[in-house]
Amino acid sequence: MSPAIVTTPSRWFIRGFLVGILISGSLNAVSYFFRSEGGGNLLGTAPEHYEALGFPRTLWETGNMYGGRFIDLPGLLTNALFAAALGAVCGLLTQPFRRRLNELVERFEQAVIAPQRGTFQFSLRGLLTLCGLASVAAAGAHYALAGNPAVLGIIYALGPWILVLIAFLPVGLDWQQRVAVLVPTALLLMLAAVATGAALKPPLEFDKVLLYIFVCWTPQSVLVALTLTVGLVFYHTAVAKQ
């Protein structure tokens, strides 16, 4: 087996643990929509709305400095302990399925890692999609400079899906190189959101924009990861039966 993905029991436990942390982060992010008034102030158009987040305990809310601190430390500790417990459970759940997971990793590496590493090219469909994304980005830049809050809504709602699409557009790349494409693109999209927030009337503080990106992107990232994982599992299971 290729050593690109280590498959020792401890590594599977760590991966399961990190999945639990990601799920806990997603629960904290989703709590914003349940704890905040009228969907909060995601677009900067309702600054009077009450905002809060935290699961299972509230750890932040507008207008409360918690004795001079930005977040509630006991609430943060409770949520961190919950995340650690959930991560430990997910890590332990990987252990009975190590053999099956190792087989899936082997098939994944054989199918996904390109035979000619470093080849960077686009298919015709990919080029057309890239042109469409460039057009959308140009239109978004125009409205962002004009301070249109709809641009923030698009980044919040579609950001993770756009990033995955961009990462998968080039052909002939292995998964490590796709991650190398994904990371700087995500940073650029976050900078675009911050710039859009600064152009609003009244402007939306950059830390609030980053908070809203966390609130909107984290649950979607979990959904994207789950969709890709389930798709890969079904695909390789079907291939193995042929």
Image (tube, rainbow, N blue to C red):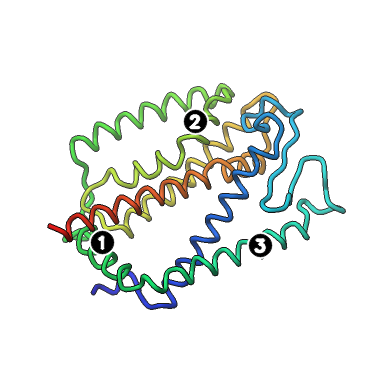
Residue depicted at x 34% and y 47%: 167
Mark 1 vs mark 3, CA separation in Å: 33 Å
Q: What residue type is labelled 1?
A: Phe
Q: Split into 4 quadrants, where in the image is the C terminus? A: bottom left
Instruction: Tell me residue 157's x, y (percent).
Output: 49, 34
Q: Split into 4 quadrants, where in the image is the N terminus? A: bottom left
Residues packed near mark 2 inside 10 Å, few (<14), some (14 to 19) or many (20 plus) = few
Please count the marks in the image: 3
Secondary structure category for the residue under label 2 = helix
Per the rendering, the mark at residue 242 is: none
Residue placed most toward the observer, 7 or 190:
7
Task: Tell me if residue 183 comes above or below residue 123 in the rendering.
Answer: below
User: Which residue bears the numbered disc 1?
Assistant: 108
Task: Tell me if residue 177 comes above or below residue 60 in the rendering.
Answer: below
Residue depicted at x 30% and y 50%: 231
Image quarter of residue 3: bottom left
User: Which residue bears the numbered disc 3?
Assistant: 80
User: Which residue bears the numbered disc 2?
Assistant: 154
Residues packed near mark 1 inside 10 Å, few (<14), some (14 to 19) or many (20 plus) = some
**In this view, the mark in front (2 or 1):** 1
